Amino acid sequence: QAIAQTKTTAGSLLAQTDWYIVREQETGEVTPTDILNYRQAVRTASGAIESAIQGATTHAEFVALYDVPVDAEGNPTGNAPINDWPETL
């Protein structure tokens, strides 16, 4: 289920910029580099999240994928591994 959700999230994030790709195919207008980079970052994140899910061999390891990293004061320093998506444009 977690991998299916990851694929759904990736698809949803990519769908937001699909029109750039369609426009390029239909009109030849080049897709901006930042859009292409974002789309690649989404695919990379999806692969990393799926690998982390598959690599979790125990329930505790799987649950740990939902832990948000924090600094010494308890302030979040990033995203939980299972939610480590690039920032939307």
Image (tube, grey):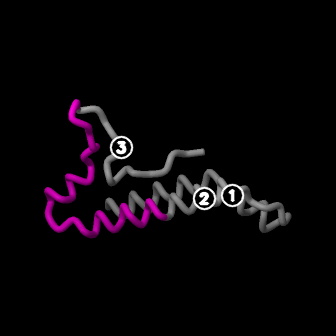
Q: In this figure, which residue is indicated by the disc labeled 1? A: 33
- For image coordinates 60% across by 55% down, the residue present is 15
Q: Quadrant of the N terminus?
A: bottom left
The percent coordinates of residue 80 (x first, y second) are 32, 48
Q: Secondary structure at mark 2?
A: helix
Q: Amino acid at mark 3?
A: Gly
The percent coordinates of residue 62 (x first, y second) are 21, 58
In magenta, the rendered stretch is 44-73
| Left or right side of 71 for 21 | right
| Left or right side of 15 for 85 | left
Q: Earlier in the sequence, mark 3 or mark 1?
A: 1
The percent coordinates of residue 61 (x first, y second) are 18, 59
Marks 2,1: beta carbons within 8 A: yes
The numbered dot on residue 78 is: 3
Q: Earlier in the sequence, mark 3 or mark 2?
A: 2
- For image coordinates 69% across by 58% down, the residue present is 33
20 relative to 25, above or below: above
